[in-house]
Image (cartoon, rainbow, N blue to C red):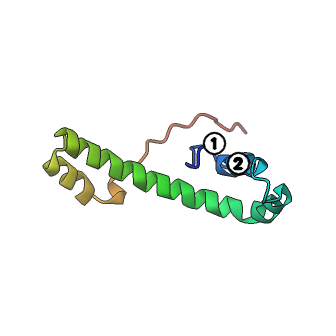
Amino acid sequence: LTSKGASGVTGAGFITLAATLAVVPDIPIASLALLVGVDRFMSECRALTNLVGNGVATIVIARWEGDLDREKLAYELNKGPDAVVAPVHPTITETD
C-alpha cells in the first residue's frame, strides 16, 4: 500500500504517485511525463497545506486534551509575523 499524504521530502508525492500508478493497469506509466512539469508547483502547494494543517491540528489536539492556553495563544498570534526572527549563525566565513 502507498500513502497519499505529502511528506516532508520534496518530490516524494510524485514518487508515491508513480508507485501507485505502476499497479493500476488502466493508466499508462508514460502519462507521468505530463505531470513532471507541474509537480514542483504542486509540491510547494502540498507543503503549504501540510504546514497549515499541522498548525490547526496542534491547536485542536491541545484544546481536546485541555492543554490549550487561550490567552497565550491569542498573545502569540497577535504579535504578527514580524515578531519571529530566526537567529543568524554564520557557519561559513569568507577570507580575502
Q: Nearer the viewer, residue 23 or 43?
A: 23
Q: Look at 48% across and 58% down and name the residue there.
A: 49
Query: What is the x, y in percent for residue 77?
Result: 26, 56
Q: Which amino acid lies under the numbered mark 1 shown in the image of this protein? A: Thr
Q: Which residue is mark 1?
A: 2
Q: Nearer the viewer, residue 74 or 46?
A: 46
Q: Find numbered disc 2 in the image and state the secondary structure of the residue it sits on.
A: helix
Asked if 20 appears above or below 40 in the picture, the reply is above
Q: Mark 1 and 2 residues: CB-CB less than 8 Å, in contact?
A: yes
Most extreme residue toward the top is 91
Q: Nearer the viewer, residue 28 or 96?
A: 28
Query: What is the x, y in percent for residue 4?
Result: 58, 49
Going by the image, does 42 lie left or right of 30? left
Q: Nearer the viewer, residue 93 or 4?
A: 4
Q: Which amino acid lies under the numbered mark 2 shown in the image of this protein? A: Thr
Q: Quadrant of residue 96?
A: top right
Instruction: Check disc 1: other Cα within 10 Å, few if <14, some if 14-19, many if 20+.
Output: few
- Classify the position of the N terminus by image quarter: top right
Q: Earlier in the sequence, mark 1 or mark 2?
A: 1
Q: Find numbered disc 1 in the image and state the secondary structure of the residue it sits on.
A: loop
Query: What is the x, y in percent for residue 29?
Result: 82, 55
Most extreme residue toward the front is 25
Q: Which residue is mark 2?
A: 20
